[in-house]
Structures are given as structure tokens and as C-alpha cells.
Image (spheres, helix red, strand yellow):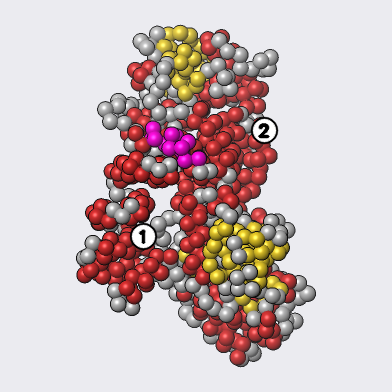
């Protein structure tokens, strides 16, 4: 790429790289000046939502005109490459300036207030940087500090992940609430700037440790060391200001960088005097809407993968019955001992884990049965089992499942007895009966291992080869029965969205068997939902090391997670394709497959994949958005409109879907249709906690009313929209333009 010309820019050298893409030094041939070009990664550029967010944030940043912020000139696209055009700053990063040691008092007074002033300008526009550190402060000509690299910036109150779904700050500089998954606002930047101040004044980073996990622990739990007595008196006078920034509780910090800048300027003018600190004020956070679809999708993908039948997982119409289809149902606990209830699921899950290893069998384990039941409950005129009740033989037979394994757990003196039956679902005829008995302390693996030979005979398969069954079971699951019991406890908590309880159980299981891939994989989901992103990254690394130990199903789930978190559309297609073959009843896996095709711009395959879900009136709203946009890309706007109409009905005017639908109609000039759609969506409870979302819908309504000639009502909706949309939001620029058009500004 070096030496090539993109549009009116000649690329000179690569000067940086990050999660979003690469940064190059270039020469602007049109304006004869040097600039920095920040390219969005091609995979992200192919994602319309990631692209929209990149452009949106670039516009917001371009509106920041401040001497202490590296200027953003705009967003351009050339030869299919999307990039941000930034000012080129001659100089050094503050990190490089601090390599020999702390600043001198004179230079500290000159530089530090300006850094806070720059951040304050961003905070006033509702923009939070999220990666403030000394490496992201440039010291240029005239010793002027400029805050740069707002690459993972977001608007205040937005708790989304970055486009890849992974926390992207810098351990040691990042505020505790970010790691906890709590809402972030200007005070999160204040914490990070406090670390920069501490480094600039003392020459050390207070929470820097040998590895990221230790730095995370320090940020969450440790207080920074006090300033050394040998530091200049001017610096020790500033220590209370720095410590206020580094409070663990956001409410105890400065409210924003503006308050901090005021304190720093006071100190700079009288560096030996005590700086009066403002009172501590707790600020409430707010939710920002519309949610970035890419961030929402990443979270939804992982949640759907782990919380299996608790969400909108459904089924495709069953095909012809398979002669080798077998359902493994929950066993009954007939011992009268509630402490053994865990075995009701534990035994069949272990049996299912064994049987699914055979390619000759079509096994319906707990997940596939849950998918079938969920689908039946959302399909008109379909008969589904009562909630909490097992599926009936009639239900199973109606879905092409030929046989079922049922069983019970009993007491036989001091022994445990597991007995089971293989039955035909048509008529309930007994095919095979089996039973094993052993001492209660012999363990579930020992008892189920003794079942395997009988099941191999009854089902005419060879699962274990020449290996001993109990050892084989441990090999494909875990070496510890206690770890398996803890895993089941965690799995139950995960399904009930009790994330902390689930994480605790998985951690205990892994303490007993660190190679237990099932527990490791589901622990990733618990960490994700808890917002413990540093732990998530560590467990992802361990999961990849263990991938070869997982069975085919487990490997596909790992690959799905990695493709979502890593922003890998081809990987998503591969993993989702494999999972839809294993779980054809799970409609969300099908949606993910379509999503992968859409991101790769394979619109025909996307539409072919998603159309059956549209026909089934699947409840995941973005199914219809992607299917409709694919149809439009293929030139069939009539079909696209039909899909949008169906989605609007199915989602019951869900605001985010409506926003996409209205934009499609506006592109067709169908303004008359949009007014009732917007008015209905504005009545939905989903907007209750999303004032920005309400403002953006009202802005669209104002635009529609203006086109239709209802100027008085348009002005009123515009007034209400501008009250809800803060400065710095992309929609605010549109609102300001309309205000000028109506002479209201």
C-alpha cells in the first residue's frame, strides 16, 4: 500500500495499527499537506452497522474544533476503502516524553491543563474517549498537548462493546466500571486521565503490573501509592486532585474533565497552594438508542449460543423421519432425596454427550428438544408440551423422532440404581431395557459408563472402540465427577441469567479440572454478561488451547464465539453452517448464517437463508432488516417492502426495526407511509429508557411532516427532538440543519 494513491491521498508510510484497522501517513495532493489516514478494517467496512457507526463517530469527532484535540477532517472512501482523515501532528507522544522520567514543574503546568481542556471539549459534545493514556496524547509544536485516537470513543451512557465485541481499552489506565460492564461516562475518562497525571508527575503508572490480569486486579482493588516525599512540592500539592480522579466509585471523582481542567488551571497559577476540590456529585447515566447493531448482535450471538432454549430458538419444518433419530429425555429421581435431583439432568446429558459422538445417530439432546418445543410454542395451531413437562411421545413422533431414551434413578438399599428404556415413540413399544447398580459413592461416571455397552448393542453403534467406557466418558467430558456436577449447577444458573452464580460454579469446576472444555466455554458466556472482559480474554485464550480436546459440536461453538468476538464473517459462516446441520431446529443459528452472508455481501445466499425464517414469522427483528436489504441489493424492492411489512407486524413496531424500515421508505420517496409507522412506534414501551431513541424517531417524524406540508406539527416535533438529542450525536447535526431551515435557530 505504501506509495499508492487513494483518491487525492498518496500513502507514505504506516504509522500505527489497532483493532479497528491501520493508520498511515499520507500526503493530501489536493491541499498539499500531510495527514494521517485511519482505515477501518475491511471486514468491518463490509458490515453496514459497523460502517454506519464509524461514519457517525467520525462526524461527531470532526465537529470537535479545539486546540488540544487532534483534528478530524472527515471520512472518505476511495477504491472501496473507508478511512478517516486526521490532522498529522509533528512531535512525540506524551508516553515517549515521559520515558526519561516525570515532567519538570514548568512543563507540567504548561501541558496538563490543556489535556483536560481537550477532553472537556469532547465531554461537552457527549463524547467519551474510552482509551485515554499517555500514548494517546501528542506533544506538538509549541509544546501544545493534543488528545488523539478517539478510535473506540462512544457517546455518553452507551454501554456497548466495540464492533468486535471485545473491550478495547488499556489495562492499567481503564476505569473499574469499564471492567465491571457498568455504564461509562465522562468520569471514566477522568479516571484514565488521573493515571496519566500520576505518570506525568511521578514517572510511574500506578496500576502497571507484569501482565494484564494483575493490572485489572490493581485497578479494581488497590489504591495508588502515595506521592514520594522527594517529588517537587508543586507536585505534592496536586496529589489530592490526582487521587480524586482515581477514586474507584465514579461518583467520588470529578464530574467531567471540565471540573478537572478548572482544578489544574488553579494549580498552574498557584502551584504551591492547596487546590479547593468541588463537591462530589452523583450523575445518573442514561441509555443511548438506537443501539449499534453490530455491538448488539455480538452480545446477542453469544447469549443465544449459551442460553440456548431461553431465547427465540425455534425450528425449521421437520423433514422425513430418520430411522436413527433418538431423543434423550430427562430422568426421574425416585429416591426421595432432593440432593440427587442434579442427576435427573446429569445422567441424560452424559448419555447424550456419549451418543452424539456417533455419526450414525441423529441425537436430540436437551438443546435440540428445547428448540423444538420453543418453535412449537410460537407456531400457530401447533401443540407443545406444558411448561415444565417433558415432551410426549406423540410430540416427538410428530417431529420425526423415532425413538426415545427414558429412565429413572432409584435407591436399592445403600446403592444407587439407574434403569432406563429405549422406546418407540409411535405407540410407546419397548425396544430395550437396561439397568445398572452400584455404591452411591462410586460416582455417576462409573454408573453411566456401565450403561454404554448396553446402549451400543441396542442402538447398533460402536462408540468406544476398544476403550473402557468410563475412561472414554471422562475423556470426552471431564476427569472429575464433582466438576461435572458443578458444571450442571452453572449451566442451570446460566439458563436463568444468574451470571455471577454461573461463573462461580464454572470457576470451581475448572479448579477441579482445568481442561474441562464445556465449563471453559460456558464460563466465557458468564464473563461476557458480567462485563468481565479481561477475564473473558484470558478464558478465550485457554479455550483456544483446549479446542482440540472438544468434540465437533464443541469446536463449532468455540469457532462461533471466536468469529463473533473477532469480527470474522467467513468464520461465522463456517461455524453457523456446521451448527445448523447439527441443530436444524435452531432458528437463531440460521439467522447467524444469513448474517454472515450479508456481511460478506453474498446477498442472494443471505436472502435464501433468511426467507424461511421470514415465512415462519421468526421474532428476531433484524432477520427482516437483513432479508429486506438483501432483496433491495438484488434489485427486488417490491419483495424488500413485503419483508419489511411482515417484520413490522411481527416485531409490533419495535423502535429499532421501525427506524430501519422508515429509512427504506424514505429512500423510495414513500413519505405518506412513514407517519403512522413512526407514531405507532413512539407509543411502544421500549422507548421508556431511551430518550435519544425517542428524539431520533421524532426527528424522522418532523422530516416526514415537513414533506407532507404540516409545518406547525413538524416544528413541534423538531423542538421535542432537539430537547432529547444531545450535542455531539449524529442526529443532532440533522436537527440543527432543520432548525435553521425553519428559522428556529
Marks 2 and 1, the one that precedes in the sequence: 2
At 59% from the left and 62% from the top, the residue drawn is 7
At 62% from the left and 35% from the top, the residue drawn is 516
Q: Dividing the picture into quarters, in which one does residue 27 lie?
A: bottom right
Q: Position of residue 631 (x, y in %)?
A: 40, 41
Residue 645 located left or right of residue 26: left
- The residue indicated by pointer 1 is 693
Above or below, 565 relative to 67: above
Q: Position of residue 743 (x, y in %)?
A: 30, 77
- The residue indicated by pointer 2 is 548
Q: Secondary structure at mark 1?
A: helix
Q: Residue furthest right?
A: 100
At 62% from the left and 49% from the top, the residue drawn is 537
Q: Dividing the picture into quarters, in which one does residue 22 lie?
A: bottom right
Q: Position of residue 667 (x, y in %)?
A: 35, 54
Depth order, front residue of 591/281:
591
Q: Secondary structure at mark 2?
A: helix
Task: Inspect this view and state whether residue 313 appears.
Answer: no
Identify the mark at residue 610; answer none if there is no mark. Answer: none
At 64% from the left and 48% from the top, the residue drawn is 538
The stretch drawn in magenta includes residue 616: no
Q: Main secondary structure of the magenta part?
A: helix
Residue 718 located left or right of residue 608: left
Depth order, front residue of 673/482:
673
Residue stretch in magenta: 602-613
Q: How many marks?
A: 2
Amino acid at each position: 500500500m505504501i506509495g499508492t494513491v487513494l483518491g487525492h491521498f498518496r500513502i507514505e508510510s504506516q504509522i500505527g495499527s489497532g483493532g479497528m484497522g491501520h493508520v498511515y501517513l499520507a500526503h493530501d495532493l489536493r491541499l498539499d499537506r500531510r495527514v494521517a489516514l485511519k482505515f477501518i478494517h475491511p471486514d468491518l467496512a463490509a458490515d453496514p452497522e459497523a460502517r454506519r457507526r464509524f461514519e457517525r463517530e467520525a462526524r461527531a469527532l470532526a465537529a470537535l474544533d479545539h486546540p488540544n484535540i487532534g483534528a478530524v477532517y472527515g471520512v472518505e472512501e476511495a477504491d472501496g476503502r473507508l478511512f478517516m482523515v486526521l490532522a498529522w501532528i509533528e512531535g512525540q507522544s506524551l508516553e515517549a516524553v515521559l520515558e526519561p522520567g516525570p515532567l519538570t514543574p514548568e512543563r507540567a503546568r504548561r501541558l496538563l491543563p490543556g489535556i483536560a481542556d481537550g477532553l472537556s471539549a469532547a465531554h461537552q459534545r457527549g463524547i467519551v474517549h474510552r482509551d485515554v493514556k499517555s500514548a494517546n496524547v501528542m506533544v506538538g509544536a509549541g509544546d501544545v498537548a493534543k488528545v488523539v485516537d478517539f478510535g473506540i470513543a462512544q457517546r455518553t451512557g452507551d454501554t456497548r462493546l466495540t464492533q468486535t465485541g471485545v473491550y478495547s481499552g488499556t489495562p492499567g489506565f481503564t476505569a473499574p466500571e469499564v471492567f465491571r460492564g457498568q455504564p461509562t461516562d465522562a468520569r471514566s475518562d477522568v479516571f484514565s486521565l488521573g493515571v496519566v497525571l500520576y505518570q506525568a508527575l511521578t514517572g510511574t503508572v500506578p496500576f502497571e503490573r507484569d501482565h494484564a490480569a494483575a493490572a485489572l486486579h490493581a485497578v479494581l482493588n488497590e489504591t495508588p501509592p502515595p506521592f514520594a516525599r522527594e517529588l517537587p512540592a508543586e507536585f505534592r500539592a496536586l496529589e489530592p486532585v490526582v487521587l480524586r480522579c482515581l477514586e474507584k466509585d465514579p461518583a467520588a471523582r470529578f464530574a467531567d474533565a471540565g471540573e478537572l481542567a478548572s482544578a489544574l488551571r488553579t494549580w498552574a497559577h498557584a502551584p504551591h497552594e492547596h487546590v479547593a476540590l468541588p463537591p462530589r456529585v452523583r450523575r445518573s447515566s442514561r441509555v443511548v438508542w438506537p443501539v449499534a447493531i453490530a455491538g448488539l448482535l455480538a452480545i446477542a450471538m453469544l447469549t443465544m449460543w449459551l442460553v440456548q432454549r431461553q431465547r427465540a430458538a425455534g425450528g425449521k419444518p421437520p423433514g422425513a423421519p430418520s430411522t436413527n433419530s433418538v431423543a434423550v429425555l430427562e430422568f426421574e429421581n425416585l429416591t426421595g432425596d432432593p440432593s440427587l435431583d442434579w442427576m435427573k439432568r446429569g445422567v441424560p446429558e452424559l448419555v447424550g454427550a456419549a451418543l452424539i459422538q456417533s455419526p450414525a445417530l441423529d441425537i436430540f439432546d436437551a438443546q435440540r428438544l428445547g428448540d423444538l418445543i420453543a418453535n412449537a410454542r410460537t407456531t400457530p395451531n401447533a401443540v407443545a408440551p406444558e411448561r415444565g413437562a417433558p415432551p410426549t411421545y406423540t410430540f416427538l413422533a410428530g417431529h420425526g423422532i423415532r425413538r426415545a431414551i427414558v429412565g429413572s434413578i432409584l435407591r436399592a438399599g445403600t446403592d444407587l440404581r439407574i434403569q432406563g428404556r429405549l422406546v418407540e415413540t409411535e405407540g410407546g413399544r419397548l425396544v430395550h431395557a437396561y439397568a445398572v447398580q452400584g455404591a452411591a459413592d462410586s460416582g455417576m461416571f462409573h454408573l453411566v459408563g456401565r450403561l454404554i455397552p448396553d446402549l451400543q448393542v441396542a442402538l447398533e453403534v460402536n462408540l468406544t472402540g476398544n476403550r473402557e467406557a468410563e475412561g472414554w466418558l471422562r475423556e470426552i467430558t471431564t476427569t472429575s465427577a464433582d466438576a461435572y456436577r458443578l458444571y450442571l449447577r452453572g449451566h442451570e444458573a446460566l439458563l436463568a441469567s444468574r451470571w455471577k452464580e454461573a461463573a462461580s460454579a464454572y470457576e470451581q469446576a475448572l479448579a477441579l479440572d482445568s481442561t474441562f472444555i464445556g465449563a471453559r466455554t460456558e464460563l466465557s458466556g458468564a464473563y461476557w454478561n458480567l462485563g468481565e472482559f479481561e477475564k473473558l480474554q484470558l478464558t478465550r485464550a485457554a479455550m483456544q488451547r483446549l479446542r482440540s480436546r472438544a468434540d465437533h459440536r464443541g469446536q463449532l461453538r468455540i469457532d462461533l464465539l471466536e468469529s463473533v468476538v473477532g469480527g470474522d464473517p467467513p468464520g461465522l459462516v463456517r461455524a453457523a453452517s456446521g451448527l445448523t446441520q447439527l441443530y436444524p431446529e435452531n432458528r437463531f443459528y440460521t439467522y447467524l448464517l444469513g448474517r454472515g452472508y450479508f456481511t460478506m455481501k453474498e446477498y442472494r445466499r443471505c436472502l435464501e437463508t433468511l426467507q424461511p425464517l421470514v415465512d415462519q414469522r421468526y421474532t428476531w427483528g433484524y432477520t427482516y432488516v437483513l432479508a429486506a436489504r438483501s432483496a433491495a441489493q438484488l434489485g427486488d424492492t417490491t419483495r424488500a417492502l413485503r419483508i419489511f411489512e411482515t417484520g413490522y407486524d411481527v416485531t409490533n413496531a419495535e423502535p429499532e426495526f421501525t427506524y430501519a424500515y422508515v429509512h427504506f421508505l424514505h429512500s423510495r420517496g414513500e413519505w405518506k407511509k412513514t407517519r403512522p409507522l413512526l407514531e405507532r412506534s413512539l407509543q411502544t414501551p421500549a422507548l421508556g429508557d431511551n430518550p435519544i431513541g425517542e428524539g431520533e424517531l421524532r426527528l424522522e417524524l418532523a422530516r416526514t411532516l415537513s414533506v407532507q406540508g404540516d409545518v406547525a406539527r413538524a416544528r413541534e416535533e423538531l423542538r421535542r427532538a432537539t430537547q432529547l438529542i444531545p450535542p455531539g450525536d449524529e442526529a443532532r447535526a440533522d436537527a440543527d440543519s432543520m432548525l435553521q431551515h425553519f428559522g428556529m435557530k
